[in-house]
Amino acid sequence: MAFKNEKGNTIVLDAVMTDLGRQRMVAGTLEIAKYAFGDDEIDYSLSFEDAGQFKVLSASSTPLLEAFENINGDINHGLLSYNRSDICYIPILKTNEKLSESVCEFMSGSNAGAYSPIGSTYYLSVNDETTAKLKTDLGADKYILEHDEYNSYKLIIESGIDATDDLGSPLLPRDKEGRDSYILQMNLLDNYLLIHADRRFIEYIIGPTPSGCTFANTPTEKAKVNFTGMTKYTPISLDLTFPHHYVYSITTIPNLMYNKGDGKDIDTSAIAGPRGSATALNFCIDKSMTTTSESDANYKYSTYGTLSKNLFNSGNKYDHIDTNVYIVGSNSQQKLVLPMRIIRYSGA
């Protein structure tokens, strides 16, 4: 559905019904059970403060979207509803690239002549040969996730309240009391994350076991992070929102990275306020896509991606597929979209 503000301040509700909805309407059995609001068309960079109130430019400056027929085209960033009225701060999901085992997103321009049409992405290498070539072309191995690897670089994700003032200074305490007050007591702790991944390319996901992992710091604020207890996660269901996707339920561990006086916790945590939980991820690619350059590329690279592209002006050619991994917090309901590039060295 979409709202239209017509002349004369008449509000028109533009709705596109599904085939099932039309059948029920004809049969006289159509009932509206629930609805949701979203603000995908709003550009908050056009906001301003007026008499102490936060406002966004009028609809004439921010055109509203029409209704869409596809199931995942209407609301990608829905407005959230919580069952209490005293919540002032909501956690977010954020990747952590500060730790020694954190994989980093590769940005266009990080390497001279780099080709990255989506601006930035996490590179997921499908075999050792590709990893070796990428280390040279990307300039560092910190940019590379390795397929089906349990002990190398990982995607580390934190959940917490990232509230800062206009100068970037934290607004809320980053200690145990702050975690208890703003996250635990508000029932905003993400005990698990729902991962939405394209089953055409990703076979399963690697994540932590609660008993074998730690995300904390010592009394001297030295990071104490351990993700050695990683295990295989298989899908729990099909994804009805994104076609061709599976849903995985990945456990998190308590994020006990506290400010203990020196403020060094900011050097190791990506969250500027109270922290809730953390997890680490890696991916196992469809085995048919992991062959070396001595074999022909799997048909999926040509069908869904690009073949033999000189991505970095180095002479090395790669087959690659760009896809997104969607992450949703269990209690915070927050979403994080991770752009992934599945990549295979195809020759020079």
Image: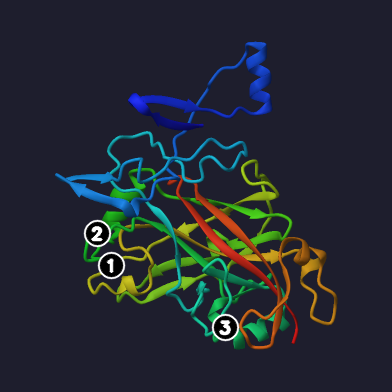
- Residue 219: give x, y in percent of width and height: 30, 73
Q: Where does label 2 land, which residue? A: 173
- Judged left or right of residue 20, residue 220 is left
Instruction: Specify the farthest residue to the top.
Output: 28
Cα–Cα gap, marks 3 and 2: 38 Å
Say which amino acid is labelled 2. Pro
Residue 128 relative to residue 215: left or right: right
Distance CA(mark 2)–CA(mark 1): 8 Å
- Disc on res. 138: 3
Q: Are marks 2 and 1 in contact (CB under 8 Å)?
A: yes
What residue is pinned by disc 1?
A: 259
Mark whose residue sits in front, 3 or 2? 3
- How many C-alpha atoms fall within 10 Å of the one at disc 3: few (<14), some, or many (≥20)? some
Give the side of residue 189 with respect to residue 289, left or right.
Answer: left
SS at mark 2 in the image:
loop
Q: How is the image coloured?
A: rainbow
Circle 1: residue type: Asn
- Height in image: 105 above or below 246? below
Rendered residue at 74%/56% (across/down): 200
**Alpha-carbon distance for marks 3 and 1?**
34 Å
